Image (cartoon, grey):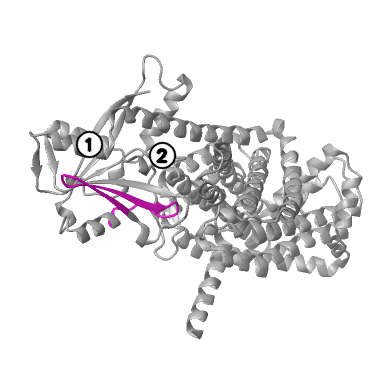
Amino acid sequence: MHHETSRRDSNIFLLAVGSLGVVFGDIGTSPMYAIQESMLTPGLPAAAESVLGIVSFIFWSLLAIVSLKYLHFVTVADNDGEGGIFAIVATLKDRLRGASRSLLVFASGLGMVSIGLMFSDTLITPALSVMAATEGLALVFPTLREWTVWLAVIVLLALFYAQHFGTAFLARLFAPIMLCWFLAIAALGAIQVWQAPQVLAALSPAHAAQLFSVLTWPQRLGLLGSILLAVTGAEAIYADMGHFGRRPIAWAWHSFAVWALLLNYFGQGAWLLRTQTYTGSETSPFFALIPAAVLLPMGILAVLASIIASQAVISGMFSLASQAIKLNYLPRLKVFQTSADERGQIYLPRINLLLAVGSVLLVLGFGSSGALASAYGFAIAATMTVTTVAFTLLAHLVWRWSRLKVVVFAAFALPLDCLFLAATITKLPDGHYLTLLIALGAIGLLWIWRVGNRYLMGQAQRLDMPVALFADMVAERTDLHHQARPAVFFQHLPFPADLGITPNALLRQVQLTSLLYQPTVIVDFSTRNVPRIGDDSRIRMRAFSHGIYALEVSFGFAEPVSIDPVLTFGQMQGWWHSPAEIVYYLGREEIRFAASGGLPRFMKWPFRWLHRQDESLGRTLNLPPIQQAELGITVEI
C-alpha cells in the first residue's frame, strides 16, 4: 500500500512538473508585458498609488480568477478527468436530456461559441508570443532587428511541426525551461521586494479600490483591459486538464507557479517605486530587473519561455477540437493518441496545419507584436464569461446546489468576467474586431456543419428504411444468394441509434449484387455525453432474421473510435475466426448543388468544403484497404 501511494504521488509530481511546460506557459510569460501595458493606461495619476493599485489589481485578479474561480470551482467540473467547455456542455446535455429543447440548444450554443473563441485565441496567441520573443531577441542581438518577422515565421513553423511528437514529449522538452524561467523571475522579483518592501502594501485591495475611484469609466475599462494580460492562460488551464489531470495542475500552481508570478509582479512594482517611474514610461520594468551581467542568458530564456507560452493554447485547442468532433460539432478529423499512459494527450494534424497557416499569416500581416497586441484579449475575456455561465447552469440544474450557493458564485464570478469583457469590447475598434471576426467565422462554420448534417440525414431517411423492415424485405426475395462470409456495414451519418436505420451501403450492396452476407452485421458508432464507456456497456445488439445483426457501439467523447470492440464481440459470437475474413462496406454522400431548394445559398459552399474534410470512416478505423468497399449516394443540397 505504501509503495502504491509513493508511486501515485511520484506520478502526480512528474505530471505537475510537466504541466509547467505546457499548461502554465501562457500565464507564466505575462509578467513581461502586463505591468508595462497597465502603466501606459491614459489618465493614471503620476504617483506611487498607481503602482500599488496596479500590483494590487494583478494580485487579486490572479487569486480570484485562477486560484478561486478556476482551480477551486470550475475544474471540479472535470467530467471524468476531461476539462474544457465541452466537459460542461456534454454533462448538461446528458443530464438534461428530457428538459426543454431551448435549454439544450442554449447549451449547444455555448459549446459552439466557446470553440470559436478558443480557435481565435489559439491563432493569435502563438503569433503574438513568438513575435514578442523574436523582438526581445533583437534587443540582445541588434543585427537581428530587420529579420524579426521571418525569424518569427521560422520559429512558428518549428513549433507547429513539433506538435506531432505529442504533449508528453513537449512537456519533457519544455518543463525544464519553464522551471528555470519561474525560478529566475521569482529570484529577480524577490531581490527588488527586499530592497523596497513598501510594495507589500499592495496586498491590501484598498489600493486597487483607491486607484479605481479616481479614474473615469473609460479609463477604468482601459486599465482592466491591460490587467487582463496577467490572467491570460487561465482558460487554457481548464482546457488542458485532460492532458495532465486536475490534481497535478493545482499542485503546480499553488506550490510553485503562483508564487513565482507574484514575486515578479511585486518586484516590478518595487522597482517602479524605487525609481519613481510611475506612468507613461516606455521602459519595461520586467527587463529593468535583469542585471547587465545576465541579460544575454535571461534574454534567451525569455525568448524560449515566450515560445512555450503558445503550447498551452495549442494543447487546449486539440482537446477541445477532439471533443467537438465526437459530439458532431466538427467533421470527422484524424486524431492521433500521442501517449500510451495519458489518454488526453492527442494531436490533430489538420487543426495543427490550420493554426500554423493562420498564425504565420497574422505575423506577416501585422509585422510586429505591438500591432498584434491590439487584437488580443477579447476572445479570452469572452471565453471566461461563457465558462462561468455554463458552470453556473451545471451547478444549478445538474448538481442541484442550493440557491444561495449558486447566487454567491454567480455574484462573485459573473461581474468580474463582465468587467473584463466590457474592457475588451471598448477596444474592438482598435483591433480586437479581428478576434471577433475570426471567432464569428469559426462559429458560423460549426453551425453550418450541424445544420448541413441534419439536412443530409433528412434526405437519407427518405431512401433508407428501418432494419426490421429491411429484414422483412429480405424474407420476401427469392433471388438473393446467401454468401457464407461475414460483412460489416457502417452507418455513416449520425442518426440516433434508436431509429434503427438500415445503412445506405447495405441497401445499395443488396440492390447491385443480390447477395446477402452471412452474417450481415450493421455497426452504428455513437458518442455519449460522458468521457469514457465501460467495456461491459460498450455494445448493444439486436438480432433480426436471415443472419442480420445490428450493433450500437458506444464511445465516450474523450475516447478514440475503434473497430477493436466489434472484432472481439464478433469472435465471441462465432461470426468470424479472424478479422481477415470480414468484408467492410462504407457509405459516402456525394454533394451536389440543387438547382432550387436545399440548403440556403450562403451555406452550400462552406458545407461542401466541410464535408470534404470529413475523414473516411475506413481511414479513421485503419481498416485494411483490400477488405473494404465504399458505396456512394448523390445528395443535392
Count residues near mark 2 (Cα–Cα under 10 Å), then give few for <14, some for 14-19, many for 20+: many
Position of residue 496 measured from the top left corner of the image (x, y, whole percent):
39, 41
Looking at the rendered structure, the kind of residue marked 1 is Phe
Position of residue 352 measured from the top left corner of the image (x, y, whole percent):
46, 46
Position of residue 357 measured from the top left corner of the image (x, y, whole percent):
48, 39
The foreground one among 524 and 586 is: 524
Q: Residue at x 72, y 68 (%)?
A: 187
Q: Among all residues in the image, which is located at the extreme bottom? A: 2
Q: Among all residues in the image, which is located at the extreme top? A: 595
Looking at the rendered structure, the kind of residue marked 2 is Pro
The foreground one among 271 and 299 is: 271
On screen, residue 6 versus residue 288, left or right, reads left
Q: Evaluate if marks 1 and 2 touch, with contact meaning CB atoms under 8 Å apart.
A: no
Position of residue 297 measured from the top left corner of the image (x, y, whole percent):
63, 62
Tally of numbered discs: 2
**Residue 24 appears in the picture as rendered:** no
Q: Which one is closest to the eye, mark 1 or mark 2? A: 1
Which picture quadrant has residue 99? top right
In this figure, which residue is indicated by the disc labeled 2? Answer: 331
Q: CA distance from mark 1 to mark 2?
A: 29 Å
On screen, residue 572 versus residue 275, left or right, reads left
Which of the two discs, 1 and 2, labels the residue nearer the N terminus?
2
Q: Is residue 62 magenta?
A: no
Per the rendered image, the range of residues in magenta is 540-564
SS at mark 1 in the image? helix
SS at mark 2 in the image? loop
Q: Which mark is residue 470?
A: 1
Eyeballing the image, is 9 above or below 200? below
Q: Which mark is residue 220?
A: none
